[in-house]
Image (spheres, coloured by chain):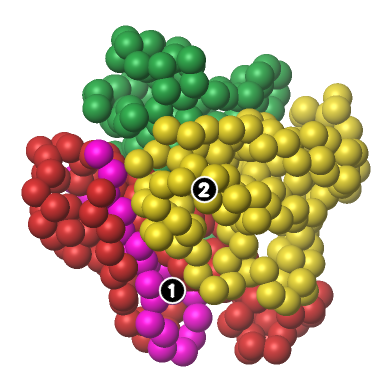
Chain colours: A red, B green, C yellow
């Protein structure tokens, strides 16, 4: 049951792809079939499988979440209580709650069974640089 | 470790139930206990476990997502960049990001451990007909 | 493959932590490595991994979901059809659809691989008291 922690540096809000690292981890295990679980160890970033073709899709996704949950410096967010860690912090927790902390991906013939256009992304919701930990767990 | 791809034809936005097909797959495996992972291989539809009793619940769910993420032909969505694939395309990616691409369901005594009112649905976010692939993966 | 059903009593909308019960279940299994899947058997409550430090984060999360999906007694929700089970019922289904029904958490050295600030919560969306069932499933 191979398991590792992947550390991804982030530089502000955005989608950071790690499909290749996940494929390499599965490949290195030498096993052909199983289930890869990806799990992010934070509450202000999250995981997303999304289109890896047109980058405009990622731009629009970020814009949607920014409009749905603006920074707490926006007057519309005057009701927010948790403000000690900056205007991007509580929105980060909310965006993480609206997306996923854990995703299971079946593996066959040594490959993730992703669709043609699917990529794995870390969805960073904080402005400042962070080092984010993702657990990769391959069960058979 | 049985694994299969279930293909579901869709005819426009809506919730398409596949609980019976998932139960049949688990049953055919001959194993009594384990974990069924369902994974959808697309970025413009998603998965949902929801009430399978009153169909009004599904009507209201669809209406909520339509109001939260209107078609890009709606003036409110003027900020959307990715428009090449039609007014339902970028909203489909956003709705998929807000729901789930993968769900794990424990199995006991050869049955999915669903609650009384829970059904498994493919949540189609596109208007035109599609053939959607869902991986069913039963690990023990 | 240990498996159990955890029953949590709830007393209205809120986040109910069960990290300790999940840790105890993993610990009692005597196994050091694997994958814990948590699965909630209802469609009007859900699961959330969120910050277990400042309680204001939970307050703000509840407030956000209340603002995004108000009770159906709110004039803004006049379009809702499913009203037979009270003003908190259809919003509960919608909030459940926006969060998670199932989460997989890797286990190493007999412990859940949660980050420092992560706690496991049942997210209750109904007003009246309920007894909620969560399946804990530990696969190796």
Residue drawn at point x = 43 percent, y = 74 percent: A124
Could you tell me which secondary element the residue under label 2 belongs to?
helix
Q: Which stretch did the figure color magenta?
A: A115-140
Residue drawn at point x = 73 percent, y = 76 percent: C54
Q: Count the marks: how many?
A: 2
Front-most of B102 and C75? Answer: B102
Badge number at residue C26: 2
- Seen in the picture, residue A5 relative to A12 is either above or below; the reply is above
Establish whether labels 1 and 2 are both on one chain. Answer: no
Residue A59 visible in the picture: no
Residue C137 visible in the picture: yes
* Quadrant in the rendering for residue A22: bottom left
In reply to whether residue A69 is colored magenta, the answer given is: no
* Quadrant in the rendering for residue C64: bottom right
For discs 1 and 2, the disc positioned in front in the rendered view: 2
Badge number at residue A124: 1
Instruction: Please give left or right for residue B52 compared with residue B54 in the image.
Output: left
* Mark 1 belongs to chain: A
- Seen in the picture, residue A24 relative to B131 is either above or below; the reply is below
Magenta stretch, main secondary structure, is: strand
Q: Residues within 10 Å of mark 1 (few under 14, many from 20)?
A: many
Front-most of C6 and B12? Answer: C6
Front-most of B115 and A19? Answer: B115
- What x and y, as percent, mark residue A16? 31, 71
Instruction: Please give left or right for residue A133 compared with residue B48 in the image.
Output: left
Residue drawn at point x = 63 percent, y = 69 percent: C51
């Amino acid at each position: 049951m191979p398991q590792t922690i992947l550390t991804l540096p982030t530089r502000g809000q955005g989608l950071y792809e790690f499909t290749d690292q996940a494929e390499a981890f599965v490949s290195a295990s030498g096993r052909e079939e199983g289930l890869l679980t990806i799990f992010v160890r934070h509450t202000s970033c999250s995981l997303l499988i999304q289109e890896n073709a047109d980058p405009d899709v990622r731009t629009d996704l970020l814009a949607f979440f920014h409009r749905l949950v603006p920074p707490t410096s926006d007057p519309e967010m005057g009701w927010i209580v948790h403000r000690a860690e900056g205007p991007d912090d509580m929105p980060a927790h909310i965006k993480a709650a609206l997306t996923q902390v854990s995703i299971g991906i079946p593996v066959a013939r040594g490959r993730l069974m992703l669709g043609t256009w699917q990529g794995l992304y870390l969805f960073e919701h904080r402005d400042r640089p962070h080092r984010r930990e993702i657990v990769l767990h391959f069960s058979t």
